[in-house]
Amino acid sequence: MALAGCTGALSTLDPAGPAAAAIAELWWVMLGGAVLIFALVMVLLAGAFRQRPPPEADEARLLRVWVGGLGLAFTLTVLLALFAYGLWVGAQLKPAASAQVVQVQAEARRWSWRFRYADRPGYSSENLLHIPAGRPVDVAIRSADVVHSFWVPRLAGKLDATPGHVKVLRIEAAQPGRYAGQSAEFSGPGYLDHRFTVLAHDAAGWQAFLAGEGP
Amino acid sequence: MTALRRHRRLAAIWASEPGWRGPFSTVNHSDLGRMFLVTAFCFFAIGGLLAMLIRAQLASPQAAFVDADTFSQFFTMHGTIMMFLFAIPAFEGLAIYLLPKMLGTRDLAFPRLTAYGYWCYVFGGGMLIFALLAGLAPQGGWFMYPPLTGPAFAPEINTDFWLIGVTFVEISALAAAVEICVSVLKYRAPGMRLTQMPVFAWYALVTALMILTGFPPLILASVLLELERALGLPFFTPGAGGDSLLWQHLFWMFGHPEVYIIFLPAAGVVSTVLPVMARTPLLGYGWVVGAAVALAFLSFGLWVHHMFTTGLPELGLALFSAASTLVALPTGVQVFAWIGTLWKGRPGLQLPMLYLLGFFGTFVIGGLTGVMVAIVPFDWQVHDTAFVTAHLHYVLFGGFVFPLLAGLYYWLPLFTGRRRFFRVGELACALIFIGFHVTFLAMHWVGLLGQRRRIPSIDADSGWTLINLISSVGGFVLAIGLAMVLVDVLLHALINTRARRNPWESDGLEWAMVTPAPPYNFASLPQVGSRHPLHANPALPLQLARGEGYLGEPREGRRETLLVQAGDGRPEALVVYPGNSRLPITLAAVTGAAFVGVLLKQWWLLALGLSGVVALAWHWAWPARAVAQDAQPVGGDTALPRSESLARPPGWWGSAFLLVADATFFAALLFGYAFLWTVAPNWPPPQWLAPSLPALGLGLGLGLAGAAGAAAGLRWAWRGGRLLSAAGLLALALAWLLLLRQAPAGSSHAYAGALLVLAGFALLHLGLAALMQLRLALAQRRGRLGAARAGALAIATLWTDFAAGVGALGLAVAYLPPLWQ
């Protein structure tokens, strides 16, 4: 779904992983629904101003139509459908246990990120997160000082780095490449440049990284 | 007596002092309502100016003209000013000005409290503006998450300005809320049933109740953070058992209801103005009122949707997502009831209607994007991006500013008695609408492209340049539109073209008076038997001016109105209001001194200020003279007793609603205590409260017996009852002092800090109850109570019961949990 105007290194609408793709699709569906509902409301609003014979005074009927029909039934139907759809998307995004999952740790501080790797003990990288492409990665996120947020828009949604807590976010890049990441919780003067890069390796590159070759 | 003579005599009784002294001593709701509104719009202008600076900074990658720190002061103050110094006070001002007029009475329940609230607002707001001008403004974003705002990362005074200033301003919100609750329930025109109230009064009542239950968690959070900053009690420091998430929970427990606290009054304006524009009664009055109540309840169940990205358990997410989605249902009911009303009637396109159309075209989009961000996975992407900024502006600007402007133009003739001459407002409406949508539609888009909120500049290669430029241009168009509204209102004030009375042919009582509205509102009070009093009896304004209603004979220079039964509006008592007084502004200034003491960490100033507050409050509540027992004529052949002599006088109602807020504060405190216990890192604390068995028995026994004695004593008729009650309060206080002796040092762990705060809360209320009892005993001995005795006792009993309750419950909560460890 690469419409013009949707691309960009940080665009949620230019997804490069399953989670971001599911959420982008969720957005397009919701946008379509919202436009339809908005148009309906505007048409109804405009309809009240058209030239017409003196309005009917049957208050009970009007209540049935406007409050019962549109206000309650219509709104509730839309909301239930959307909520169910949202739950379904949420269930799709739920991290499934799998032997394939790669474990990494991300620690935020003002204003850098340090990444550690379960498969390469003792090694850490700064502002550059190595992951294998095509495999789910669980990022254990923590903070050393204030609240930050780990966000790689093209791969997945964000998760806060809260001091004293460790939270796990599942990300996955479909293809090898570089993906921009940024902290998304205001953290003071260096907030703008609190960024990092995710480097997704192909299988060979990942093995080389684990073996300690390359960067 | 002729109508003119009656007008002159009433005006003399109700007028504020002439000249420059007037505003400082007035306690009249019309004056104070206007002052609130004018002040709120001044803050709106300052907040708008900051918005322009923000948009200028982000207009292009090269446009940045201030550094990151100054920029963070801009956006923090923009949000803070718009939320706390504009939106809430503007509602308060509108409600304070309109409610007595709509309800057919002469003033609000506690005129001096209205004035006190106003001056707290001005002084607290002034502190924040001073900080802004001095370059010391808070810079942590308007929701001020610690630890970024804690002592380790923000030791400067900037954060204190926010915590102190906002808390000071919140006093005015609580004061207005108490005032509105009591006024709507007890100060209506005789005969007006609850179900016949103008719909705006319902919205105001619901909003006021929400303020009473929504603001205390934020006040608690501010107190806790200030305690951490000033005294090192580590509530938000994870290393010592604190948790940043505690702040987030408390803040959003306030922050989400806050959105509806802002929207509901505006919806009340829509529900009032739109039917008049459509020349027909509102469709589904009961449904609309029910929707407002439902919205209020639901809004307390959605605070977590601001925390979807903090990694909460899945079930919790689903529940809060469901509540956040469901909240759109009552909103939908209202929107469709309004459109149905337009279909039912024959709507015209007068200026207020144009702003209402702007409201529909904006707010509906805000509601739709609101449902989107209630869907958890989507929120994971757009949270903390420009998309959310855009969404909240659609809700708040669409849901508040457009209706407020509609209301402004609708009630302007009532304020001034004039009609508009130049048609600037129409053009302004178009500019505001276009400017707004250009600004914020663009912002949705750039948020989806990954632009975070609160960044001080944009990168040239981000692909966001053009969108931000468009957004900034739209912002300036919007600002020009708003400036034109100001010009329009100023022109209106300068050019004198008399409006006829009730120019919109409304059915509301606020139009049953001469315009501009006189300080006493009604020359005599109407008997109301319909939801549309002016349509039911078009001659009503004339009859009231002739003094054919209640209290048509001004007497003894007293400001009088009637107190009614809450449900059916039967007249219950005669109210005599206090006159002009500089006590409110003095008390607000002394309160301010106490706040400045905390701000500057000058504890002597805090002590001085607090003593001053106690002394002035004592003076305030001291009865001027004993109330006579006999019933007084109020018009017709009705005679009523004085309101002070009721078993539940107005002061009792005010106390009851204030205690609702107080109880919410206590509940939030217990929530915080339990939350830290179960969720925060680094628990259990190194040292529990571990009393020996005798100490535990002594503490709990003394406390529980004391609480029982304090509460029971006041209810016993025998002479020693008062003494027993006082002794009970003393015993309970002793129990708390015993506990404090055993407690670990407050700065060692959040647990110990929580014990200190619980103790402080209990002791404060025990002291308050003791003071009330002392006042009661002294006033009675000096013969100042007369017929007011039962009522004064009822008030003291209420406060004593509360103190006994929180004192005993707090003790149990402090002592018992460690026993299970």
Image (spheres, rainbow, N blue to C red):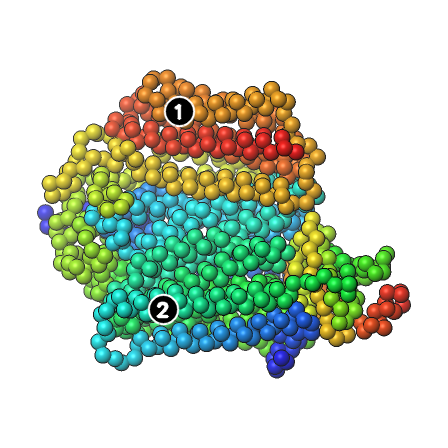
The image's mark for residue B472 is none
Residue A24 is at least partly visible in this image? yes
Residue under label 2, please give it: A69
Please state the horizontal and vertical placement of residue B304, each as a whole percent of the image.
55, 55
Residue under label 1, please give it: B712
**Residue at the image position 31 percent from the left and 53 percent from the top:** B201
| SS under mark 1 | helix
For disc 1, the neighbor class at 10 Å (few under 14, some 14 to 19, many from 20) is some
* Residue nearest the viewer, comparing B367 with B221: B367
The amino acid marked with disc number 1 is Ala
Name the subunit of mark 1: B
* Image quadrant assignment for residue B232: top right
Left or right: A201, with B556 as reference point: right
Q: Do the residues at pointers 1 and 2 share their chain?
A: no
**Residue at the image position 66 percent from the left and 60 percent from the top:** A159
The amino acid marked with disc number 2 is Gly
**Vertical side of A132 occupied by B550: above or below:** above
Please state the horizontal and vertical placement of residue B762, each as a whole percent of the image.
51, 32
* Residue nearest the viewer, comparing B512 with B812: B812
**From this viewpoint, which residue is outermost toward the bottom?**
A4
